[in-house]
């Protein structure tokens, strides 16, 4: 009798592990990313900070789509890159010889020049 009551509870607990684990890792990634931004990661470790931002955004998207294992993996990658950004930014800030990395400036590609065949012909 006790076994028949315990089985549904065990199934419910097992089913809720995915969302809980994903949320925990996403929370860890948010903290790590905040730490990276606090150490001027966007200035001194642009690549790692940007990757951490993107991985965290994708992890939240996957969590919203109930793909909890994917969200957990992506959030773990965000933690990894955010931690690398903190380390790199701290090293670069403490080093007087290395200048900060330039800020990323993404501009749209220039419009292609019209081809000579595209001009209307006059009779």
Image: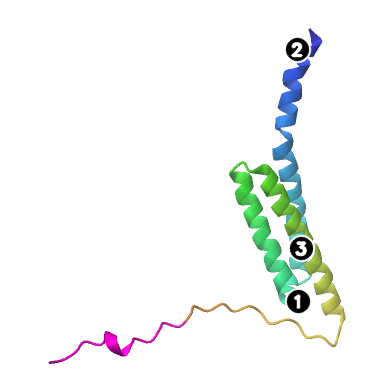
Q: For the point 69% across and 65% down, which residue is it?
A: 51
Q: Residues within 10 Å of mark 3 (few under 14, many from 20)?
A: many
Which of the 4 image quarters holds residue 57? Answer: bottom right
Quickly name the residue at label 3.
82
Answer with mark 1 or mark 3, whichever residue precedes in sequence.
1
Mark-to-mark CA distance, 2 and 1 = 58 Å
| Of pointers 3 and 2, the one earlier in the residue sequence | 2
Q: Quadrant of the C terminus?
A: bottom left
For label 2, the residue is 4
Kindly identify the residue that appears in the image at 78 percent across and 7 percent down: 1
Comparing labels 2 and 1, the label whose residue is closer to the camera = 2
| In the displayed structure image, the side of residue 28 where residue 109 appears, left or right | left
Callout 2: SS:
helix
Mark 1 secondary-structure assignment: helix
Magenta stretch: dominant SS?
A: loop
Check disc 3 and report its element: helix, strand or loop. Answer: helix
Which residue in the rendered view is the most extreme toward the left?
Answer: 123
Instruction: Indicate the colouring scheme.
Output: rainbow
Figure check: 82 above or below 123: above
Task: Find disc 1 in the rendering and name its residue.
Answer: 44
């Amino acid at each position: 009798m006790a076994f028949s009551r315990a089985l549904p509870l065990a199934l419910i607990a097992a089913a809720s592990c995915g969302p809980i684990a994903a949320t925990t890792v996403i929370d860890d990634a948010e903290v790590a990313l905040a730490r990276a931004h606090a150490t001027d990661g966007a200035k001194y470790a642009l690549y790692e900070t940007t990757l951490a931002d993107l991985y965290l955004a994708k992890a939240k998207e996957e969590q919203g789509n109930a793909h909890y294992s994917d969200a957990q993996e992506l959030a773990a990658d965000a933690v990894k890159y955010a931690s690398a950004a903190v380390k790199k930014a701290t090293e670069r800030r403490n080093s007087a010889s290395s200048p900060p990395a330039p800020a990323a400036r993404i501009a749209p590609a220039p419009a292609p020049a019209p081809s000579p065949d595209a001009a209307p012909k006059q009779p």
